Amino acid sequence: MRKIAVIGGDGTGPEVVKEGLKVLAAVSKIHGFKYEIIDYDLGGARYLKTKELAPDSVLKELEKMDAIFLGAIGHPDVKPGILEQGILLKLRFSLDQYINLRPVKLYNADFCPLKDKKPEDIDFVVVRENSEGLYKGLGEFQKKGAKDEVAIQISHNTRKGVERCIRYAFEYTKKRNKNKKLTLCGKTNVLTFAWDLWQRTFNEVAKEYKDITTDYAHVDATTMWFVKNPEWFDVIVTDNMFGDIITDLGAMIQGGMGIAAGGNINPEGVSMFEPIGGSAPKYTGKNVINPLAAICAVAMMLENLGEEKAAKQVEDAVIKIVKTKLKSLAAGKMGYSTTEVGDLVVKNLY
Ligand code: IPM
Ligand code: MN
């Protein structure tokens, strides 16, 4: 019996998680996958009531789970940074989920904002480092509030952290077995400490993967290629900050936040799966938000748990309804409500 922790979180998080769990229940029945759900009340609402973010006792329990399914964290009445750092980043860091895996896959050309791009043109995966870089929170204010104030924000990159991420990316590229091409996305021309380490590590590890084609692109150029020639990419590996930025662009070219899912992976521990869009306060409680990103996160979770067939079945059902039913992937424009989209996925599991 697998133990799956569920954190609905804030805003539309609980609504999309509910649909994800609906699909999980249906597909698990087909495959005889047994699991137990353990619900955790974390997020802005709880913080406003109790001042608690992610208590150590909860972190301890989460370590013992087989997977975590997260809705969204973010509340309009809480100052930016508190919930993000205190809950989302706290979970990623303390569970050492050092990979953020973000597939960028277009299911229906009608939903792509790029002209003349088809599903076969947009199908790549970003491997984002998820434990270091600018997200480490290192830095300081000097003379805060003064006219000559200085704010320093440090990108902290360790050989160990960079290497484990790059190794994961090479292994992933090999296993994915598509174009067997791995692109390092960085900024070697300006950030000459961090990206020197990344480039050196990348080149060294590459020697062990002779059958994988390697490439390099600066992050600014990468955003240009995402729009101009997304078909050039197979797997991209990058640091935490660049990965955050380019995967929002990635989400847009695959059809929007309504469909974009990600996994915070600890290959040796417990991983956490989430739709990558936020808590969308303005759509909360209206039954209009697109639950497909959360449903795709469930597929990623199933794959991570070794249930590849169930994962594929969920993805195929999503593809089918995205191709034949939904009018749009945007909230309120799908032609169906949140719960109806969940039902449609369930109906199309075959
Ligand atoms: C994401 C989000 C988070 C991040 C925020 C909410 C802290 O944007 O998952 O991409 O920056 O990683
Ligand atoms: Mn982001």
Image (spheres, rainbow, N blue to C red):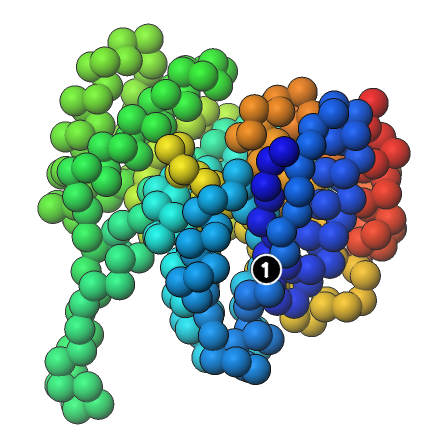
State whether residue 71 is above or below residue 46. above
Residue nearest the viewer, comparing 113 with 90: 90
Position of residue 252 measured from the top left corner of the image (x, y, whole percent)? 58, 47
Q: Is the residue at mark 1 in contact range of ligand 1, meaning its CB lies under 8 Å from it?
A: no
Decide if residue 272 is on the left or right side of residue 185.
Answer: right
Residue under circle 1?
40
How many numbered marks, from 0 up?
Answer: 1
Residue visible at 26% across and 63% down in the picture: 137
Q: Quadrant of the N terminus?
A: top right
Decide if residue 293 is on the left or right side of residue 218.
Answer: right
Q: Quadrant of the C terminus?
A: top right
Name the element at disc 1.
Answer: loop
Position of residue 67 measured from the top left corner of the image (x, y, whole percent)? 54, 41
Quarter of the rendering containing residue 72 = bottom right
Residue visible at 80% across and 67% down in the picture: 286
Residue visible at 14% across and 30% down in the picture: 200
Determine if residue 172 is in view: yes
Decide if residue 146 is on the left or right side of residue 68.
Answer: left
Residue visible at 79% across and 25% down in the picture: 30
Determine if residue 220 is in view: no
- In the rendered structure, which amino acid carries the disc numbered 1? Tyr
Position of residue 163 measured from the top left corner of the image (x, y, whole percent)? 22, 32
State whether residue 30 is above or below residue 25. above
